[in-house]
Image: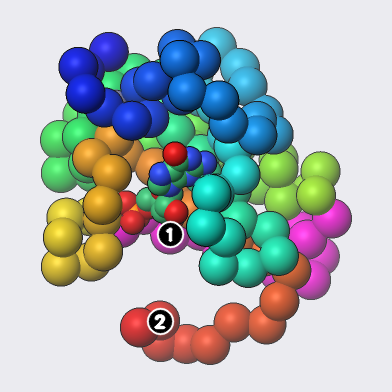
Amino acid sequence: MADDCLFCRIVSKEIPARLVLENEHVIAFRDINPQAPLHVLVIPRQHVASLNEAKDPELIGRLSLAAAEIAKQEGVAESGYRTVINTNRGAGQTVFHVHLHLLGGRDMGWPPG
Ligand code: 5GP
Ligand code: ZN
């Protein structure tokens, strides 16, 4: 756990979150400021600041597979959903504990802003 990391605090339950999935490696919870009817953040329990620091292919792969599981659970797997990892400030990363956004429940434009 990294001191002063918001998402590590969510992992340790110091800060409450609306969890949708939890296993040995990842936890997923609803975004506090949802950008779609379904907006979930999937994060590794282990602190990794961003995709730039990631070394473990299993850790990163687990985020996508958890998102697919949640999409099915939440009923958006057939209609469609988007998964996004923002890396560093130019891409909009504001919390430096790697996380995958799962967005669904509405039509989405392309390219993203
Ligand atoms: P980023 O901008 O780093 O890609 O995504 C960070 C996300 O974390 C944002 O969508 C933001 O709304 C969400 N967020 C920030 N603080 C909290 C919090 O305390 N709880 C939850 N559930 N989401 C948060
Ligand atoms: Zn962290």
Examine the residues drawn in magenta and state their main secondary structure. Answer: loop
User: Hey, what amino acid is under mark 1?
Assistant: Val
Residue 81 seen by the camera: no
Reading the image, the residue beneath label 2 is: 112
Residue 97 seen by the camera: yes
Left or right: 37, with 65 as reference point:
right
Left or right: 76, with 32 as reference point:
right
Q: Where does residue 97 sit, x and y in percent of width and height? A: 29, 35
- Give residue 33's mark: none
Left or right: 18, with 110 as reference point:
right
Residue 27 vs 65, above or below: the answer is: above
Residue at the far front in the pictured view: 15
Q: Residue at horizontal 27%, vertical 13%?
A: 1
Residue 23 vs 49, above or below: the answer is: above
- Give residue 84's mark: 1
Q: Where does residue 37 sit, x and y in percent of width and height? A: 71, 65
Q: Residue at horizontal 60%, vertical 56%?
A: 39
Colouring rule applied to residues: rainbow
- Label 1: state its secondary structure: strand
- Label 2: state its secondary structure: loop
Q: Is mark 1 within 8 Å of ligand 1?
A: yes
User: How far is mark 1 from mark 2, CA to CA?
Assistant: 10 Å
Query: Mark 2 and mark 1 in contact (Cβ < 8 Å)?
Result: yes
Left or right: 15, with 19 as reference point:
left
